[in-house]
Image: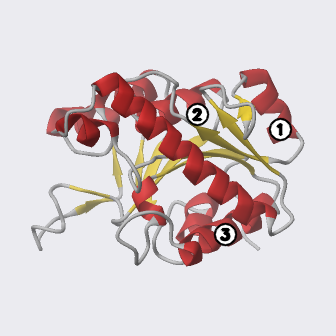
Amino acid sequence: MATPKYKRVLLKLSGEALIGSKKYGIDDTVIKEFASQLSQIQKQKIELIIVIGGGNFFRGSNLEKIGIQRVTADHMGMLATVINSLALQSSIEELNIDCRVMSSITIDAVCEKYIKRKAERHLEKGRIIILAAGTGNPYFTTDSAASLRAIELNAQIMLKGTKVDGIYDKDPAKYSDAVLYKSISYSDILKKNLEVMDATAVVMCKENDMPLKVFNILKKGNLKKAILSDKIGTKIG
């Protein structure tokens, strides 16, 4: 079995990745497959931090377009991430893996409040932690939350699971000649205005020397491969 390249990893998972064959919500086959891969990784003594978006239910910026106040819309989006986090926790725990959901907003009846020291203790005890509700503040994306938590909890790398194989010079869905970068700098991402994450998240990673890998999480086994080697996806640093 390959030796893991990283001891502590933060995975940013979009809410859309959970939709699977459905139009919205959660596809149980998809979430069970993610849970299975995560359990295999955890058994290799890799400390796992997960941040999930809520776009399969609500996206704050989209709700604003239909007349909902932006702050309210963003809070609705945060609650959607809690739903996704609890669903993933349930699937992970079915595999007899300890998992904790920690939220940036207080919802004591269903999950713990995020506290850095407490999160570190969970990781040290071999528990997977899922961080819900973004930063707890409106106007900040879950990409920014993931970058912040990766830095704060001293992750060795941040992984961003997407629907494409990595970062391209242009949209591969529109252009057949789009070129996949195997590696790229944060400075080039900002200069070329590549849509990897929002600018706040990119700048945070750049200023704190946080490596990032973007890869296709929908291909079976890719999550495990992304942690065990740098042969898939695009590495940014």
Residue at horizontal 80%, vertical 40%?
123
Q: Which residue is mark 3?
A: 37
Q: Nearer the viewer, residue 113 or 220?
A: 113
| Quadrant housing the C terminus | top left
Q: Earlier in the sequence, mark 1 or mark 2?
A: 1
Q: Earlier in the sequence, mark 2 or mark 3?
A: 3
Q: Amino acid at mark 1?
A: His
Q: Nearer the viewer, residue 74 or 209?
A: 74
Q: Are marks 2 and 3 in contact (CB under 8 Å)?
A: no
- Relative vertical location of residue 22 with respect to residue 56 in this rendering, above or below: below
Camera sees residue 196: yes
| Quadrant housing the N terminus | bottom right
Residue 200's x, y, as percent?
A: 34, 26
- Relative vertical location of residue 75 with respect to residue 227 in this rendering, above or below: above
> Gap between marks 2 and 3, in whole Å?
20 Å
Circle 3: element type:
helix
Q: Amino acid at mark 3?
A: Gln
Circle 1: element type:
helix
Q: Are marks 1 and 3 in contact (CB under 8 Å)?
A: no
Residue at horizontal 17%, vertical 33%?
191
Where on the picture, by quarter, is residue 115?
top right
Q: Which residue is mark 2?
A: 150
Q: Residue furthest front?
A: 67
For the residue carrying disc 1, how many other residues have a C-alpha within 10 Å: few (<14), some (14-19), or many (20+)? some
For the residue carrying disc 2, how many other residues have a C-alpha within 10 Å: few (<14), some (14-19), or many (20+)? many
Q: Amino acid at mark 2?
A: Ala
Where on the picture, by quarter, is residue 155?
top right
Q: Which residue is mark 1?
A: 122
Residue 78's x, y, as percent?
A: 48, 36
Residue 130's x, y, as percent?
A: 66, 45
- Relative vertical location of residue 61 with respect to residue 196 in this rendering, above or below: above
Residue 211's x, y, as percent?
A: 49, 39
